[in-house]
Amino acid sequence: MENFTFYSPTKFVFGKETEKETGSFVKSFGGSRVLIHYGGGSAVRSGLIDRVKDSLKKEGLFFVELGGVKPNPRSGLVYDGIELCKSNDIDFIVAVGGGSAIDSAKAIAAGVLYDGDFWDFYSGKKGIEKALPVGTVLTIAAAGSEGSGDSVITKEEGMYKRGTGSEALRPKFSILNPELTTTLPAFQTACGITDIMAHLYERYLTNSKDVEVTDRLIEALLITMKNEAPKVMKDLKDYQARANIMWAGTMAHTNSCGVGRSQDWNSHNIEHELSGLYDCAHGAGLAVTMPAVFTYVKDHDIARFEQVAKRVWGVDTAEEGIEAFRQFLISIGMPSTLGDLGGSEEDIPTLVKNLCYGDGRDGSISGFVTLNEEDCANIYRMMI
Amino acid sequence: MENFTFYSPTKFVFGKETEKETGSFVKSFGGSRVLIHYGGGSAVRSGLIDRVKDSLKKEGLFFVELGGVKPNPRSGLVYDGIELCKSNDIDFIVAVGGGSAIDSAKAIAAGVLYDGDFWDFYSGKKGIEKALPVGTVLTIAAAGSEGSGDSVITKEEGMYKRGTGSEALRPKFSILNPELTTTLPAFQTACGITDIMAHLYERYLTNSKDVEVTDRLIEALLITMKNEAPKVMKDLKDYQARANIMWAGTMAHTNSCGVGRSQDWNSHNIEHELSGLYDCAHGAGLAVTMPAVFTYVKDHDIARFEQVAKRVWGVDTAEEGIEAFRQFLISIGMPSTLGDLGGSEEDIPTLVKNLCYGDGRDGSISGFVTLNEEDCANIYRMMI
């Protein structure tokens, strides 16, 4: 195991009706003037936003609202949010939604306290040292952003999708009510499941040695997802399956199971170009990406792929393990080809160019294996 | 899964030579006048206390020292520590050692800010609302106190061993350098391994339903212990095995794998009377206690014991699983009978009386199963 620091000072409040406590948690973490940041209509129509507002009113807290966050959240709304916060002296941001609303809230939180262009953080020009405090009310088990210091934003100019991370972005509190996820349609539910499993695989593909404890923890969460996903796909209102998936999703991305080891994240980088270009769901893009990437890189450490095949999928070889995962993704309704995402072979040069050279990269991406232009083109071709 | 709050705001700093950063972490968490609290001579002889002191000096921090913490830490030294802190305006406590030093530091930290007798917290008369900040430099992978809000102290008058817990007791930072554990003798190492596994079993024995994610996480950590323990018992200087065990020990007790479910803790309660009366090592007492308790209560939920037998021990039945665990404990050098601990059948009435009526109890202990006097006597008799 390698030296590491692990710091996850987010208060997780899990269970039924917990969103009604939002106001009291904002107050306990020192907030007084709040931006409520959210996405589309469902959070409003379901009455969730009203419940959050009521909880803020109950505590006598001032608030303004900014809705309209889209999946693959955009830089434009971040700029709007920064201005809104500045003009209203906002001191706390509550994100209501999934990873998109939370990531957008984090970008605003960092941008408010920065004199330059917030995109500097995402292009890698600057590290984030401070940010407004953020709390979350999670409605989708997927991104893990509720328990991480990470954020991914798409720059509209060029449609570059880039991520950043900082301890300053870890939410102060995250309210996880599995009931809120029971109204999610099947496709979005499956996209979330795929994203959670990707966060686990990205950590599993390590070049570090002697990491049994973190291997076992990742496998535990992968097995949980393998077993609970079919239950929830069969009955979208299965509270217990939703609850297991929600906590697994959070634990998958606090990094408690990823410490002391190198990690991959090539699948995420390769996927980001897909959802950047096609505006497809991130989980759907990952479902197409991961089997291709794993097949391409497996010989780099075949024993590692065999291990997960045996311990998680109950099969013997690396190839069988990758195929079992691919079939699992298809079984929950995920796409499996570039065409399913609305893409085609003609797009590959653009995808590769954006991936390997876009916004500051130097011709390759690195992780479990370093992949150059040719490797990336080969991987995208495997998705056809 | 049941509603829960999970909050683990401890900064874990893991790896080689990390103790040299103690001073900078104290400073970053606002400490300026420090009590260094530790146990016996080994931390001094090894130069560890000097390295910690040097790191405090480097940051220009004032400090006083209080050594002499014994295994099963006593109330007497806690009173001394409280006085020492008050007379020196101490605002931060650094515990250097294992669970005993850390638990004693936590008791002092709470006692300094309380007008009454600190024992009120341990007898259950009062809850802990505030405490001085505590940081730890861990030297034994065992108690998990470095990542928990728990503390156990023995009251010299009556030799009652009692625990308390509060979010206010969670350490601000914990420095985990596996190198510091490589000088531990075999017996203490094995006691630590046993304690860690007990923390996992106590969480595994639940009456809650639909807790797959936490079941799987506990099993992951139990499997890690099962695999890494023989390596470290074979070569006490095996850094990687020590590192895996150290992180597993911390993760076993932050409660990240125990949320959303009822827990047991009867084995700990039953054992506390053993180490209270015989002053034996807590881990050694647990090794004698657990197989007896598990055998006595298994029929309450035989499927749960079968599950851990299959998934962790690779055997089919509940009985075989308990026996496999018992043999494992013997294989790492743990005792298996009351006699091994220096006890005898004659002590059972005293043990039962202290357990079921001592310091505020009403004739039974509750957990996975509620156990009355007769049950507890039967369990102690099974240890003969």
Image (cartoon, coloured by chain):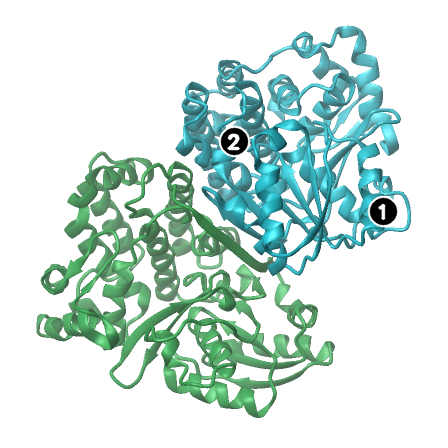
Chain colours: A cyan, B green
Which label was assigned to residue B146?
none
- Quadrant for the C terminus of chain A in the image: top right
According to the picture, the residue beneath numbered tag 2 turns out to be A181
Residue at horizontal 83%, vertical 38%? A80
Residue at horizontal 41%, vertical 28%? A238
Question: Position of B231 compared to B316: left or right?
Answer: right
Q: Which quadrant would residue A286 be assigned to in this image?
A: top right
Q: Residue furthest bottom?
A: B87
Circle 1 sits in a helix, a strand or a loop, which is it?
loop
Question: Position of A139 compared to A212: left or right?
Answer: right
Amino acid at dot 2: Thr
- Viewer-proximal residue, B88 or B139? B88
Asked whether residue A122 appears in the rendered view, the answer is no
Residue at horizontal 72%, vertical 48%? A166
Residue A129: percent from the left, percent from the top?
78, 54
- Chain ID at mark 1: A
Q: Is residue A308 above or below residue B47?
A: above
According to the picture, the residue beneath numbered tag 1 turns out to be A126
Residue B292: percent from the left, percent from the top?
18, 55
Asked whether residue B260 appears in the rendered view, the answer is yes
Q: Is residue A16 above or below residue A368?
A: below
State how far apart marks 2 and 1 are (Cα).
35 Å
- Chain ID at mark 2: A
Residue A53: percent from the left, percent from the top?
62, 45
